[in-house]
Amino acid sequence: MTDLALPARVRRPRRTGSAGTMVAVVVLGGVVAAALLAPILWPLDQSAVDLSRTRLAPSPEHLAGTDDLGRDVALRSLYGLRVSLLVGAVAALVAAVIGGVVGAVAGSVGGWVDRALMRVVDTVAALPHLLLGIFIVAMLRPSLGAVIASIALTHWLSTARIVRSELLSLRNRPFVDAAIAGGAGRVRVLTRHLLPHVLPRLALATTLMVPHAVWHETALSFLGLGLPPHLASIGNMINDGQRSLLTGAWWASIVPGLLLVAATLALAVLTGRWRDRLDPRVRAELQL
């Protein structure tokens, strides 16, 4: 009996996107593994310069060529991706904590507290993220901590809204009424009965935030307001490589950019699949 002959209730769910998911797993796993193992397998002196080997084209000795200071582009790209992913992951976690606390307070307390916090969220959301991030970095002076703070303080809004909406939909459920009738206080209800249901959504939102945070860090570094210029990061490398484009040394900026696109696109595909599995509406559609 074929799939089409089965009733809608018992029809097997379609398996879609499995090939794309496997490709994303292989790409992301390979890139992240290479970036993490690069300092162990290929130690790099960030300040090392070899002016006798500047702007060499890709070759077996230098797979992605060299930049205008004679540094290996492939190796520095792995170091740069490592730094960019670290900054993006830490900034996403900090933003998730800020948004989670704000959303939990707004959703559990309600009333004027909820309205006041949501007005703050709407006000910050109305500001351009990149311009606000530039202002924060300029106030704190460009550094690793300033970049993380800039990303975290401009990316917590969606997390706050997600946590608040989940709590609002859960706090009127029968199991919450039963916990209150049993003598549980507001804090106990929040920590023992509500937050465990919110954590999967919060984890998904945090993971979805990482590619965005990485691109935000890249934009700040490209503008010269991110990480120190001597430190290998994707934004710094693209910024440095744009000067070599006029001389035909396209690899100095194209290679790190392609590596960034591959890593963030693979991560976005995997988190998209995770989101589809968590969404009950999508699961229902897959079973039709």
Image: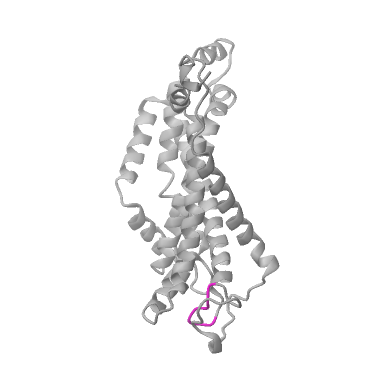
Residue extent of the magenta highlight = 64-70
Residue 204 on image: x %, y %: 51, 38
At a point 32% along the width and 37% down the height, the residue shown is 119
- Residue nearest the observer in this picture, 13 or 235: 13
Give the answer, above or below, for where 98 lies relative to 58.
above
Give the answer, above or below, for where 138 lies relative to 95.
below
Q: What secondary structure prevails in the magenta region?
A: loop
Give the answer, above or below, for where 204 lies relative to 166.
below
Would residue 86 appear left or right of 140 to someone viewing this image? Answer: right
At a point 56% along the width and 52% down the height, the residue shown is 28
Applied colour scheme: one colour
- The quarter in which the C terminus is drawn is top left
Quadrant of the rendered structure where residue 124 is?
Answer: top left
Q: Pick out the residue farthest to the front.
A: 1
Residue 106 on image: x %, y %: 42, 31
Q: Is residue 177 magenta?
A: no
Quadrant of the rendered structure where residue 282 is?
Answer: top left
- Residue nearest the observer in this picture, 260 or 96: 260
Q: Pick out the residue farthest to the right.
A: 40
Q: Is residue 267 visible?
A: yes
Residue 221 on image: x %, y %: 44, 65
- Residue nearest the observer in this picture, 271 or 88: 271
Number of marks in picture: 0
At a point 56% along the width and 45% down the height, the residue shown is 22
Q: Is residue 225 visible?
A: no
Residue 61 on image: x %, y %: 61, 78
